[in-house]
Image (tube, coloured by chain):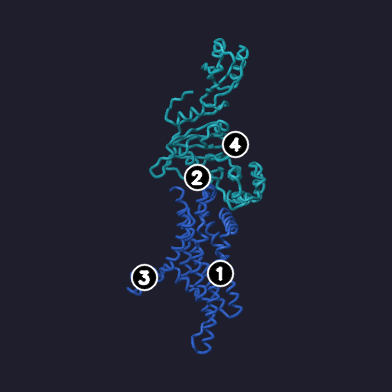
Chain colours: A cyan, B blue
């Protein structure tokens, strides 16, 4: 759906995006991860035809962003970092304006606006001034703007910044609900968000892609996940049994007060179930079992701090 | 051109939803009203004095000429307040991204912006018909001359607005846009005197006549005398088109700079 090849963007002498290439498949949610100033927004601006690249090519749905921007723009919904809203308009007026800009035929306009109001839960604020809305609502208005023309591709630049936790989870829910019907690129510097919503991540640092990984169910990368179990009575017998399980790669016993065992396993739910079964069968007194979420964070920090060797 | 229409609609709405349109219109009418009252007063005094053979009388057409020359100058002060927000506000609110990522051409954006401010100025011009009404009520002005004057005003406004839009596209601060637009317009007006001064001092060489030609003042004056010269119409139209073209270039360059 989206193909980027050797894309480079310079601002004066400063290299913002340095020779990056990636593809995004139809229906995929791609997380675009990186520190502030890593080049995320610049890449997105190029993909949305807001800005030309210095060199390289990018295409959306088979149309080149430089040669046929009109076709590309028609297919993209874009939410920039600061939602592009007019504070002096009513929400309904704003959406009407965007619908006109998007050249939605007037016969369908009403239907589309109603649909997007419903989807972004803007019903209550429809007749309020955009300028009087809270940050969360403004963000939703921005999202509504990006969705109004049913774009095939959605490009969201840090859509959850500045939202409260409830709103963040609502926004994530909304983005997840778009899965499979639309292709989404989603930039953020919040790791848990990527783990919670995306199918795949691209980590970008100083304009370069430093990692491209699929995210599995466990919210970790690279096919390995860490699980911690806490038992009342650990024994060599238990550790042996755990170690002999298929898919378990490493078992570490840590003790502080209680017996904590950290297992490094292949990422699959079957293994989790199996570990629990063994712990119970050995009568070890299983108290707690939890995935170690730090994996992704470790991975990320290691990557951007320049250490290419990842230790999990 | 649906994008342009959408922008015009939205801009006019923004003008009338904020105090700006009302304040500018109010101040304009107040100043023009004061000038009109003063001129009517002078007109009467001169004509009374004329009856006693003490001064030369003036016709109501002369009164209209003075009035509209003043109006064209007052509009130089008014225009910046209406054009300053056109692009700079979009830049400040980060809404240019919305316009540029919508499926339309840049020229639609530029034309939409230009015509929204221009329509507002035309509304202002329409309100000033009230002076025509009073002149017709109490005197017998030649409506053809006034018609030519309004045509000239409409043309002059197009060039004021295009210049304001161009300057607004160059900055993200409304205040700076307003100040520079005002300076630019004032400068254009003063070019006439500068050109005449040069001509007077050194004869019709040294750019004198050229400067006079560049200034809108002389071109506008002939309209107030009821003369519609093709060269004046061409001057205003080409000025406007060229400035719109420059605006288009500047707006485009905002993206790759």
Give the residue pinned by disc 4.
A165
Q: Residue at x 59, y 39 (%)?
A: A164
Measured from the top left, where is residue A236 in percent x and y? 54, 10
Task: Please rate how many residues cluster around mark 4, counting C-alpha atoms within 10 Å: few if below 14, some from 14 to 19, many from 20.
Answer: few
Quarter of the image where one finds residue B24: bottom right
Q: Is residue B158 above or below residue A261?
A: below
Horizontal and vertical percent for residue A155?
A: 54, 40
Co-location on one chain, circles 2 and 1: no
Left or right for A179, reference B216: right
- Locate residue B104 relative to residue B235 in the image: left or right: right
The secondary structure type at the circle numbered 1 is helix
User: For the residue labelled by badge 4, is the local secondary structure a helix, a strand or a loop?
Assistant: helix
Residue under pointer 3 = B208
Residue wearing tag 1: B30
Q: Which residue is at the front of the view, A284 or A150?
A: A284
Disc 3 element: helix
Label 3 in the same subunit as label 4: no
Sooner in the amino-acid sequence: mark 2 or mark 4:
2
| Label number found at residue A49 | 2
């Amino acid at each position: 759906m989206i193909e980027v090849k050797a894309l480079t963007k310079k601002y004066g002498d400063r290299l913002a995006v340095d020779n990056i290439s990636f593809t995004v498949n139809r229906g995929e949610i791609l997380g675009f991860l990186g520190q502030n100033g890593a080049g995320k927004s610049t890449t997105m601006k190029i993909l949305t035809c807001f800005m030309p690249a210095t060199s390289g090519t990018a295409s959306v749905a088979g149309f080149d962003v430089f040669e046929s921007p009109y076709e590309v723009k028609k297919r993209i919904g874009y939410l920039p970092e600061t939602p592009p809203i007019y504070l002096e308009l009513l929400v309904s007026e704003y959406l009407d304006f965007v619908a006109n800009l998007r050249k939605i035929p007037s016969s369908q306009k009403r239907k589309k606006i109603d649909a997007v109001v419903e989807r972004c839960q803007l019903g209550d604020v429809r007749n309020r001034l955009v300028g009087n809305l809270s940050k969360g609502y403004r963000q939703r208005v921005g999202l509504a703007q990006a969705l109004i023309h049913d774009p095939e591709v959605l490009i969201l630049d840090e859509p959850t910044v500045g939202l409260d936790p409830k709103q963040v989870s609502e926004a994530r829910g909304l983005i997840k609900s778009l899965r499979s019907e639309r292709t989404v690129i989603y930039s953020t510097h919040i790791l848990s968000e990527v783990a919670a919503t995306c199918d795949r991540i691209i980590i970008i640092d100083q304009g370069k892609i430093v990692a491209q990984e699929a995210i599995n169910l466990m919210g970790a990368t690279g096919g390995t996940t860490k699980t911690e179990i806490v038992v009342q009575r650990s024994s060599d017998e238990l550790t042996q049994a755990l170690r002999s399980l298929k898919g378990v790669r490493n078992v570490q016993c840590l003790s502080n007060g209680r017996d904590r065992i950290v297992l490094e396993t292949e990422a699959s739910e079957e293994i989790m179930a199996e570990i629990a079964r063994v712990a119970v069968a050995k009568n070890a007194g299983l108290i707690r079992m939890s995935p170690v979420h730090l994996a992704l964070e470790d991975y990320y920090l290691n990557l951007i701090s320049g250490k290419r060797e990842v230790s999990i | 051109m649906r994008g342009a229409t959408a922008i015009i609609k939205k801009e006019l709405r923004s003008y009338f939803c904020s105090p700006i349109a009302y304040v500018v219109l109010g101040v304009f009418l107040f100043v023009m009203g004061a000038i009109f009252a003063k001129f009517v007063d002078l007109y009467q005094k001169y004509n009374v004095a004329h009856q006693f053979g003490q001064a030369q009388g003036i016709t109501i057409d002369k009164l209209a000429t003075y009035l509209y020359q003043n109006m064209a100058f007052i509009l130089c002060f008014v225009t910046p307040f209406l054009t300053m927000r056109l692009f700079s506000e979009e830049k400040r609110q980060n809404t240019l991204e919305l316009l540029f990522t919508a499926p339309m051409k840049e020229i639609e954006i530029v034309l939409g912006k230009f015509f929204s401010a221009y329509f507002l100025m035309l509304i202002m011009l329409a309100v000033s018909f009230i002076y025509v009404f009073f002149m017709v009520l109490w005197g017998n002005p030649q409506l053809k001359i006034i018609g030519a004057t309004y045509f000239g005003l409409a043309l002059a406004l197009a060039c004021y607005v295009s210049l304001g839009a161009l300057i607004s596209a160059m900055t993200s601060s409304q205040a700076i846009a307003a100040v520079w637009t005002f300076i630019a317009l004032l400068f254009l007006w003063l070019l006439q005197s500068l050109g005449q001064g040069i001509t007077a001092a050194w004869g019709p060489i040294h750019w004198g006549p050229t400067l006079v030609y560049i200034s809108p003042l002389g071109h506008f004056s002939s309209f107030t005398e009821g003369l519609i010269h093709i060269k004046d119409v061409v001057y205003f139209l080409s000025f406007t088109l060229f400035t719109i073209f420059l605006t288009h270039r500047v707006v485009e360059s905002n993206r790759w700079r």
